Image: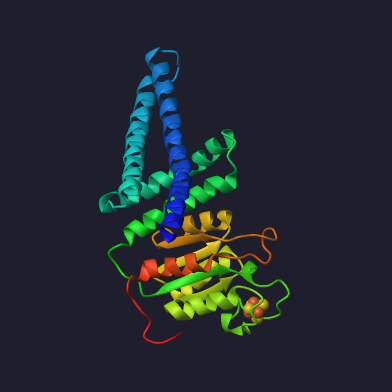
C-alpha cells in the first residue's frame, strides 16, 4: 500500500517538475529565436546599425545561450538520473535563475497559474538539493516555519522564542517542536523573508527545511544561494496567512534527508 502511495506521489512530483523544466526549455528556445531573427536581419542587410558591432553582440549572445543550454541539459540529466554533476552546479543554477522570469511569463501565456509554476520550480529545486546532499550528513539543520501556522487567537509570542508555545495542541507548532526535538533540528518561527534571513544569519545552519507558500518559498530559495534548502509548501484550508497547516511527515523526512543516519545525542 505504502509503495503504491509512494509511486503515485513520485508520478505526481514528476509531472510537477516537468512543467517547470518544459517552461525553461521554451524560454531558451524563445531567446534563441530572437537571436536567430537578429542574425537573419543582419545577413539580409536590413539594418542600418554597424554590422560589426551587431555581429559581436550576437556572438556574445550565442556563447551565453550555449552556457544556458549546457546548464539546462545538465539540470535535465541530473533530475532524470538523480545524480549530481558537480562541475556544472553553478551553470545549472545560473541557467535556472536567468530563465526563471521568462519561464514564468511563458507559463502565464499558456494559461498556467503562477502558483502551479512556482510549485513546479520548488519540486525541481528540492530534487536538485536531494541529489547534491546524497554523500554528506548535515548536523546543523534549521526548520524555518511561517507564523501563519500558529493558531490566530494564540496570545503567545513564538516568533520571539518558540519555547513560548504552551503546547496546548490548538495548532501544529506543538507538533513541529516535537519534530525538532526528535530530530535535533533547530526550529524558528518567522514573520517573513526579512526575519528568515536574520535567523539564518544568526544561527548559520548547514541546511534548511523551509515551510511556506509557493511565493515565499520561491523567493526564499533564490535568496539563500549556496545554502541547501528543501521547501515544503504549506496547506491553506482557511485561505492564505491564517491557521495554515503542513505535512509533518514531509518535514521530518526532509530533515532526515539532510542528516542521513545522524541522531541527536540528547533531546534539544
Ligand atoms: S500549540 Fe502553542 S502556538 Fe499553537 S495555539 Fe497552542 S500555545 Fe499557541
Give whichever of 199, 120 is nearer the camera: 120
Q: Quadrant of ligand 1?
A: bottom right
Q: Is residue 11 left or right of residue 112?
A: left
Residue nearer the viewer, 184 or 47: 184
Q: Is residue 259 visible?
A: yes
Residue 108 image offset from top left, x and y in percent: 58, 37
Q: Residue at image x 68%, y 72%? A: 151
Does 164 appear above or below 150? below
Where 193 falls versus 94 (above or below)? below
Taking 102 as reference, is 240 left or right?
right
Query: Residue sitting at 36 percent across and 71 percent down?
Result: 259
User: Where in the figure is residue 163, as x and y percent of width and height?
Assistant: 57, 84
Residue reaching furthest right?
A: 153
Q: In this view, does 261 lie to the left or right of 235?
A: left
Q: Residue at left 71%, top 80%?
A: 155
Q: Nearer the viewer, residue 58 or 174?
A: 174
Q: Position of residue 194 (x, y in %)?
A: 57, 65
Q: Which residue lies furthest to the front in this view?
A: 1
Residue 157 visible here: no
Residue 35 location (% of width, % of height): 41, 26
Q: Quadrant of the N terminus?
A: bottom left
Residue drawn at (58%, 58%), measured in percent from left and top?
213
Hey, which quadrant is residue 22 in on the image?
A: top left
Amino acid at each position: 500500500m505504502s509503495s503504491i502511495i509512494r509511486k503515485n506521489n513520485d508520478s505526481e512530483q514528476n509531472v510537477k517538475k516537468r512543467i517547470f523544466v518544459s517552461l525553461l526549455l521554451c524560454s531558451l528556445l524563445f531567446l534563441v529565436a530572437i537571436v536567430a531573427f537578429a542574425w537573419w536581419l543582419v545577413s539580409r542587410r536590413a539594418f542600418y546599425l554597424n554590422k560589426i558591432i551587431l555581429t559581436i553582440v550576437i556572438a556574445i549572445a550565442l556563447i551565453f545561450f550555449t552556457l544556458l543550454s549546457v546548464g539546462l541539459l545538465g539540470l535535465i540529466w541530473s533530475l532524470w538520473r538523480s545524480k549530481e554533476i558537480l562541475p556544472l552546479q553553478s551553470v545549472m543554477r545560473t541557467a535556472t535563475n536567468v530563465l526563471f522570469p521568462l519561464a514564468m511569463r511563458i507559463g502565464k501565456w499558456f494559461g498556467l497559474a503562477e502558483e502551479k509554476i512556482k510549485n513546479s520550480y520548488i519540486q525541481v529545486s528540492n530534487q536538485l538539493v536531494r541529489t547534491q546532499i546524497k554523500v554528506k550528513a548535515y548536523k546543523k539543520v534549521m526548520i524555518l516555519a511561517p507564523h501563519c501556522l500558529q493558531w490566530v487567537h494564540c496570545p503567545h509570542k513564538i516568533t520571539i522564542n518558540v519555547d513560548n508555545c504552551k503546547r496546548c495542541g490548538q495548532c501544529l507548532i506543538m507538533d513541529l517542536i516535537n519534530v525538532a526535538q526528535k530530530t535535533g533540528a533547530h526550529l524558528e518561527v518567522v514573520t517573513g523573508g526579512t526575519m528568515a534571513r536574520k535567523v539564518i544569519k544568526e544561527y548559520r545552519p548547514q541546511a534548511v527545511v523551509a515551510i511556506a507558500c509557493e511565493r515565499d518559498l520561491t523567493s526564499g530559495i533564490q535568496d539563500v544561494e549556496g545554502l541547501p534548502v528543501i521547501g515544503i509548501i504549506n496547506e491553506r484550508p482557511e485561505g492564505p496567512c491564517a491557521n495554515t497547516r503542513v505535512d509533518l511527515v514531509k518535514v521530518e523526512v526532509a530533515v532526515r534527508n539532510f542528516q542521513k543516519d545522524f541522531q541527536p545525542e540528547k533531546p534539544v
